Image: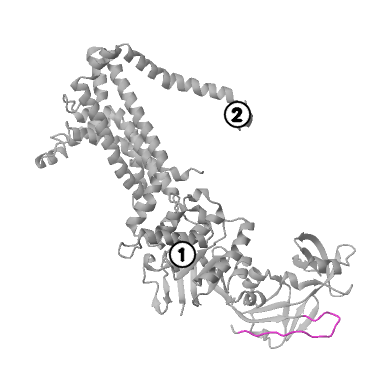
């Protein structure tokens, strides 16, 4: 009741009820159903589903490649955001718009175009092949697709923060004798880190969940380039094994949740200076 | 030797931020650059700090070219208007920054840095705040951290950009006196930029008044106030107000009176401006004497009385300022009518380009007395 009295917005109960309803029906209910289906297997049945070499390999690839892709996105995204914010050049606005392309493109289209480009007979693939670099149908391809879809998250989260950053701090560091290297690593990067981590977490989440763009370029070779979401689809598609798919889904759900919680905690730590008292 | 700034010019597009600015600052001097926003004072500061380069002109420090040095190596401490403290560093880390970023050969040992930081924080009276983050400090405290940080690199020139601009009035007044004392104890050549007249006049050894990229006047606070060189300085520093005066022959004609000014060759003048300061409009001691004035409104502000007056038939209301005591003694006005004297008016004569050629301060004798007061001065253009 006190919260109601103090609240600026009227209709506290109504809006809270509505929020919980939407959240419950759209997010919690499906997740609960997933866990329920997975639980029907029992511990042994569950392990029989998860413990296979094929599933473990796919999980390792999904999470490993996603972590690596998000890291690459963080570095590349920082660079792109930096260039777009700090420099004025011809076609800057066009480049800026292009950043959103992976958002807008149907993932299947992205997957097909990447495959066409990097396939052994593709425009880039045919040139990389003599150098001994295979991209399509390998783990590198998986990584590439994940980097592609995750990049806009990092760029778009960083951009407004970079734009609002006062040049005062850099100039202060400059007059105090810091080199450009020191100005970046001691002043700018620590200030950008919380935002960078947000972008990282978003890119990571997207990469873990990515399906459409990855499966084409991955080629889905047994034990090597199968990602976990692909296995889930496989289980339903070819074996009508809903419980098995749910078990795998539950594992992905739990792992993703853990990762995101860890990211949030890390982010809080990098922003410890902003907390007053 | 100090710093010798000569003929600086800086242009941003069509805007002339600095127009032929020359200034010399003595060693250990405390100089205020005063001007409204857009007058070029911040441009001057940024050029001295090395954050900007002039289009023309030179700056010498002890005979050596300062502009050739990179900002990193200038040994110039800059305190920003909004402090620009590094929010992710504690107070101690902020202050130590300038020492920690030095190349390792000239970087002091960790212990020496710690000792320096402690010493500086003691000087700015923030000993207990070593481990706080800037977000946990008040505005005045942040300002002092910024000062300590700038001083850590042992600058030979200290630049302060609107040092009290973002503080509330009470803190501002307290810090003024503190900074003045602080400067005296350090003896570092200091240049500070402000748009606050009181601040500049109260703190500085010398005041540089700027307007539209030009220096209008350089002088001691008292001199700038008493003898403004241009109508702008008169308006900006001394709150000079324009009067409908004319110079004909050797006489200043004002409100139907004519007062003699000598050596004032009005023929040279393209335009004449007559200014009066608020405190030079005084209530007449004898009732019925002097200029008639209509009281438009009256405000009592902490020991002084500010009045808006319509003097004679002059359209523009004039601001007058008296002490409460004078007001109580002389307020014989039964209604809103009273009589005032002008104690001193300043006459500027400008040439066709708007440059001041002549300036003279006229002390009009009281209307009924025959005493002619009036040391006036002729200045070089």
Q: Where in the figure is residue B352, as x and y percent of width and height? A: 59, 78
Q: Which mark is residue A42?
A: none
Image mark 2: chain: A
Of B202 and B185, nearer the camera is: B185
Q: Where in the figure is residue B356, as x and y percent of width and height? A: 61, 79
- Say what secondary structure mark 2 lies in: helix
Q: Where in the figure is residue B104, as x and y percent of width and height? A: 31, 61
Q: Which mark is residue A3?
A: 2
In this rendering, does residue A222 appear at all?
yes
Q: Is residue B212 left or right of residue A141?
A: right
Point 71% across, 71% down: residue: B277
Q: Where in the figure is residue B147, as x and y percent of width and height? A: 49, 61
The answer to whether A108 is drawn above or below residue A69 in the figure is above
Q: CA distance from mark 2 to mark 1?
A: 49 Å
The answer to whether A233 is drawn above or below residue A78 in the figure is above
Q: Quadrant of the C terminus of chain B?
A: bottom right
Residue B302 occupies quadrant: bottom right
Q: Is residue B377 magenta?
A: yes
Badge 2 density bin: few <14, some 14–19, many ≥20, Cα 10 Å: few
| Residue topped by disc 1 | B151
Image mark 1: chain: B
């Amino acid at each position: 009741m006190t919260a109601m009295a103090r609240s600026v917005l009227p209709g506290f109960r109504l809006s809270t009820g509505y929020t919980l309803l939407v959240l419950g029906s759209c997010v919690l209910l499906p997740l609960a159903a997933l866990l329920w289906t997975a639980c029907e297997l029992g511990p042994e049945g569950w392990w029989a589903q998860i413990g296979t070499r094929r599933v473990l390999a796919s999980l390792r690839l999904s999470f490993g490649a996603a972590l690596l892709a998000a890291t690459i996105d963080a570095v590349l995204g920082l660079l792109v955001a930096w260039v777009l914010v700090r420099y004025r050049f011809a076609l800057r606005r066009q480049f800026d718009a292009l950043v959103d392309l992976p958002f807008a493109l149907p993932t299947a289209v992205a997957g097909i175009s990447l495959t066409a480009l990097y396939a052994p007979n593709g425009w880039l693939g045919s040139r990389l092949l003599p150098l001994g670099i295979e991209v399509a149908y390998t783990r590198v391809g998986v990584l590439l697709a994940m980097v592609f879809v995750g990049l806009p998250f990092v760029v778009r989260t960083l951009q407004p923060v970079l734009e609002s950053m006062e040049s005062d701090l850099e100039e202060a560091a400059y007059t105090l004798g810091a080199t450009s290297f020191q100005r970046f690593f001691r002043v700018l990067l620590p200030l950008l880190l919380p935002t960078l981590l947000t972008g990282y977490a978003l890119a990571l989440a997207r990469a873990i969940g990515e399906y459409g763009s990855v499966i084409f370029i991955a080629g889905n070779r047994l034990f090597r380039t199968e990602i976990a979401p692909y296995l889930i689809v496989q289980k339903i598609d070819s074996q009508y094994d809903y419980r098995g798919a749910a078990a795998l889904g539950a594992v992905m759900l739990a792992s993703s949740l853990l990762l995101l919680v860890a990211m949030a905690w890390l982010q809080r730590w990098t922003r410890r200076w902003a907390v007053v008292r | 030797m100090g710093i010798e700034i000569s003929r600086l010019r800086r242009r941003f597009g069509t805007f002339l931020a600095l127009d032929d600015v020359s200034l010399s600052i003595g060693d250990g001097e405390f100089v205020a650059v005063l001007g409204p926003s857009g007058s070029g004072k911040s441009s001057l500061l940024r050029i001295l700090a090395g954050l900007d380069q002039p289009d023309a002109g030179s700056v010498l420090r002890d005979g050596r070219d300062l502009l050739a040095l990179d900002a990193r190596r200038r040994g110039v401490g800059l305190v920003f208007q909004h402090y620009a403290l590094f929010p992710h560093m504690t107070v101690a880390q902020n202050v130590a920054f300038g020492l920690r970023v030095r190349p390792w050969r000239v970087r002091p040992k960790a212990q020496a840095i710690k000792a320096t930081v402690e010493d500086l924080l003691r000087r700015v009276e923030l000993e207990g705040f070593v481990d706080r983050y800037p977000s946990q400090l008040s505005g005045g405290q942040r300002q002092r951290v910024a000062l300590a940080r700038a001083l850590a690199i042992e600058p030979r020139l200290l630049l302060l950009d609107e040092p009290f601009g973002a503080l509330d009035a009470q803190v501002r007044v307290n810090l003024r006196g503190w900074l003045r004392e602080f400067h005296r104890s350090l003896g570092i050549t200091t240049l500070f930029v402000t748009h606050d007249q009181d601040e500049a006049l109260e703190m500085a050894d010398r005041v540089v008044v700027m307007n539209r990229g030009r220096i209008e006047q350089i002088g001691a606070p008292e001199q700038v106030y008493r003898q403004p060189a241009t109508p702008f300085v008169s308006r900006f520093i001394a709150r000079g107000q324009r009067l409908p005066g004319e110079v004909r022959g050797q006489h200043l004609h004002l409100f139907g009176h004519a007062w003699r000014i000598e050596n004032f060759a009005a023929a040279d003048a393209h335009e004449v401006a007559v200014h009066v300061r608020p405190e030079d409009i005084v209530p007449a001691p004898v009732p019925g004497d002097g200029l008639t004035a209509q009281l438009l409104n009256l405000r009592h502000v902490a020991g002084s009385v500010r009045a808006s007056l319509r003097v004679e038939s002059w359209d523009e209301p004039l601001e007058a300022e008296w002490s409460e005591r004078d007001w109580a003694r002389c307020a014989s006005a039964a209604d809103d009518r009273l009589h005032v004297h002008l104690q001193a008016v300043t006459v500027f004569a400008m040439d066709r380009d708007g440059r001041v050629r002549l300036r003279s301060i006229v002390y009009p004798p009281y209307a009924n007395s025959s005493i002619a007061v009036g040391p006036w001065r002729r200045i070089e253009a």
